[in-house]
Image: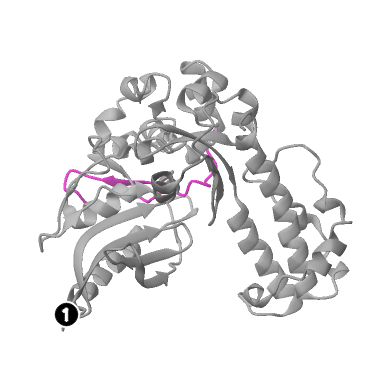
Amino acid sequence: MHKLPVITIFDIGKTNKKLLLFDEQYKLVYEESKQFDEIKDEDGFDGEDVGALTNWLKNSFVRLLDDKRFDIKALNFSGYGASLVYLNDKMEVFLPLYNYLKPYPPQLQKQFYDDYGGESLVARQTASPVLGHLNSGMQLYRLKYEKPLDFERIKHALHLPQYLGYIFSSKTTSDITSVGCHTNLWDFEQNEYHTWVKEEGIQSKLAPLMNCEAIAGYTTQGIPVGTGLHDSSAALIPYLAAAQEPFILLSTGTWCISLNPFNQLPLTDYELQHDCLCYLSYQGKPVKASRLFAGNEHEQQTKKLSAHFNKPLDFFATVQCNAGLLSKLKGNAGFQTNGHAVTMLQQSVFGERNLEGFASYEEAYHQLIADIIVQQLQSTQLVLSGTT
């Protein structure tokens, strides 16, 4: 039986983990999805179960190798940002993957920004709003001052996409798309690691940067392994390759990210305060972006709808768009734009609505989508502003 040549991609989102196979024409020929329960860190805060994720990746790959339908030619990864996996000198994972939503110690945050010129300056230099653990470099800074013994034990701190590659290649790398996504690590003005990264002894914990078009290493079967990419930056690649004119890409998931590779204006304090930032593309070029936590908001609010209307958790997937119902809901205050940008973690107006006011699940769900649309319009407008 002739085996189909394929590239294997593991796409690891915060909620959904996907295994994807593409043929030589980049057509998707196989897909499966997995979700894992989170586990608690030492403070009782939920986060990614790296052990379960690692086992699933390894077992899935072994299963694919045994699959008579496919001939795996290469392996690569995309993963969510703001997440570090810590390896000790035995190259074992020995600390939790800390959840980027975990609250950051206020005094430590103040100490950092006081030492390095203030929030506004550092945010502009690193193209990173002040986001606590969402600035993944700040996770290393916290470990240095709160858990110095653990910090000393860190041989390599790998961003999640590069850890995924390490599992199969045993090579430790850093990648510009992961380093350049709201990490506080990269100085966009100097195009190198920020001064604080060197002064605090952080850079020595980071693996060498590797061109993401290079082969990072090989599996034990000799299959080439890529470096891995930050998922939002990875999403841009086919559009940049094919586009004939400017565009904005709206990448949806747990986060809904509006990416504008054609907005070259420097980030303003206003944009930074409303969660605008710059990503680095795989070519190392800044991409202005705004973010909204809309996928998470959708997940939380549909849970409430299911409980209130006694419907299955995934009942929203059966709801067909009703234009007449949307038009009727436009009269509600939450469907009016007020001109003020909303931050990425803020709930939509729907979270404040009384569900008793809706006649059905369907009506309430239409209102939820309408309220998220308002936020999305405001979020996307931030990276449209100043462009043609």
Residue 99, magenta (yes or no): yes
Say which element carries label 1. Answer: loop
Quadrant housing residue 224: bottom left
Q: Is 269 above or below relative to 57?
A: above
Q: Residue 356, position in %: x, y? A: 85, 69
Q: Is residue 139 visible?
A: yes
The residue drawn where x is 61% and y is 75% is 314
Q: Residue 84, position in %: x, y? A: 36, 45
The residue drawn where x is 26% and y is 47% is 227
Residue 230, magenta (yes or no): no
Q: Residue furthest bottom?
A: 1
Q: Is 107 above or below relative to 316?
A: above
Q: Residue 202, position in %: x, y? A: 31, 29
Residue in the foreground of this view, choosing between 287 and 203: 287
Q: Residue 122, position in %: x, y? A: 49, 22
The residue drawn where x is 24% and y is 51% is 226
Quadrant housing residue 364: bottom right
Q: Quadrant of the N terminus?
A: bottom left
Q: Amino acid at mark 1?
A: His
Secondary structure, magenta segment, majority class: loop
Task: Give the total number of marks visible in the rendering.
Answer: 1
Q: Is 257 above or below relative to 15?
A: above
Mark 1 closeness class: few <14, some 14–19, many ≥20 residues within 10 Å: few
Q: Is residue 159 left or right of residue 217?
A: right
Q: Quadrant of the C terminus?
A: top right
Q: Find disc 1 in the rendering and name its residue.
A: 2
Residue range corresponding to the magenta coloring: 83-105
Residue in the foreground of this view, choosing between 195 and 366: 366
Q: Is residue 259 left or right of residue 345?
A: left
